Amino acid sequence: MKILVTVKRVVDYNVKVRVKSDGSGVDIANVKMSMNPFDEIAVEEAVRLKEAGVATEVVAVSCGATQCQETLRTALAIGADRGILVESTEELQPLAVAKILKALVDKEQPQLVILGKQAIDDDSNQTGQMLAALAGLPQATFASKVVVADGKATVSREVDGGAETLSLKLPAVVTTDLRLNEPRYVTLPNIMKAKKKPLETLKPADLGVDVAPCLKTVKVAEPPKRSAGVMVPDVKALVEKLRNEAKVL
Ligand code: AMP
């Protein structure tokens, strides 16, 4: 069984992002970039399924600039077998990525596609759902447990009221939530081994996909600064302020 797993290169989660002075977006010049944390969980899950003998091949895919090769090498160091970079200098919105992934699903015929539930740069939470719709595949989003057996994936997923369990007929799309697993640290020997693993580069046009953006960003602004807090002497004063000043009671 082949698993396709997606890895997006995003601003590292420890970086405090700054808005560009012209309000056109976030400044990513000289900023540390890393694999989207939910995608690390996706790669870890795919590699665990391979180590358990359920999967035979794990193929990592990244879409974007040439530097996404580094993200793919990290996926290969975690344990993916080969990488595919779909290289584009254009801004790739979730629908464009979903169309690229649909073309790769047609080409590679994986039994399972594992994506992160969302990318921490745009927080869209759309790509997995769009891919499932375009490819006509069953989907289980926000997975906290995945068991694959007998041509089916049994997925526990986090929903508002608690946990829900779905049974999906393969091939299927799964998106990862935080509780699914704890990704391993990549070791130096595995980083060295990853350098020798195959990495193919394609262009969206090779897959017949038009990635022209459908959405236009009008303006990006910092959230308003929080004003200083006020110390109140007792609960009575707090209730009085909540009732008469904040008018929330
Ligand atoms: P989003 O819908 O943008 O929040 O992204 C959800 C998931 O889709 C991410 O966690 C990735 O697994 C995948 N994804 C989105 N954009 C890309 C990309 N440019 N390259 C590879 N995977 C992506």
Image: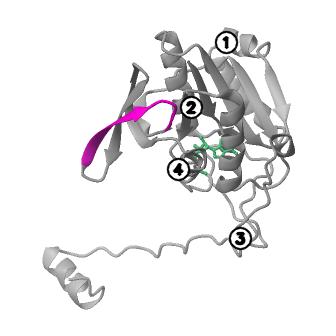
Upstream in the sequence, badge 1 or badge 4? 4
Asked whether the residues under the numbered discs 2 and 3 touch, taking CB atoms below 8 Å apart as contact, a structural biologist would say no
Residue beneath disc 2:
40
Mark 1 is surrounded, within 10 Å at the Cα level, by few (under 14), some (14 to 19) or many (20 or more) other residues, namely: some
Upstream in the sequence, badge 1 or badge 2? 2
Asked whether the residues under the numbered discs 1 and 4 touch, taking CB atoms below 8 Å apart as contact, a structural biologist would say no
Question: 150 or 18, which is in the foreground?
Answer: 150
Residue beneath disc 1:
190
x 52%, y 31%: residue:
171
Q: Position of residue 43 (x, y in %)?
A: 57, 27
Q: Which mark is residue 217?
A: 3
Q: CA distance from mark 2 to mark 3?
A: 28 Å
Which amino acid type is marked by label 1?
Asn
Q: Position of residue 221 (x, y in %)?
A: 65, 72
Residue 238 vertical position relative to residue 4 in the rendered view, above or below: below
Q: Position of residue 50 (x, y in %)?
A: 53, 14
Question: 31 or 245, which is in the foreground?
Answer: 31
Residue beneath disc 4:
129
Of the two numbered discs 1 and 4 in the rendering, the one whose residue sits closer to the viewer: 4
Q: Is residue 221 magenta?
A: no
Q: Position of residue 201 (x, y in %)?
A: 84, 31
Where ligand 1 lies, by quadrant? Answer: top right
Q: Is residue 165 magenta?
A: yes
Upstream in the sequence, badge 4 or badge 2? 2
- Per the rendered image, the range of residues in magenta is 162-173
Of the two numbered discs 3 and 1 in the rendering, the one whose residue sits closer to the viewer: 3
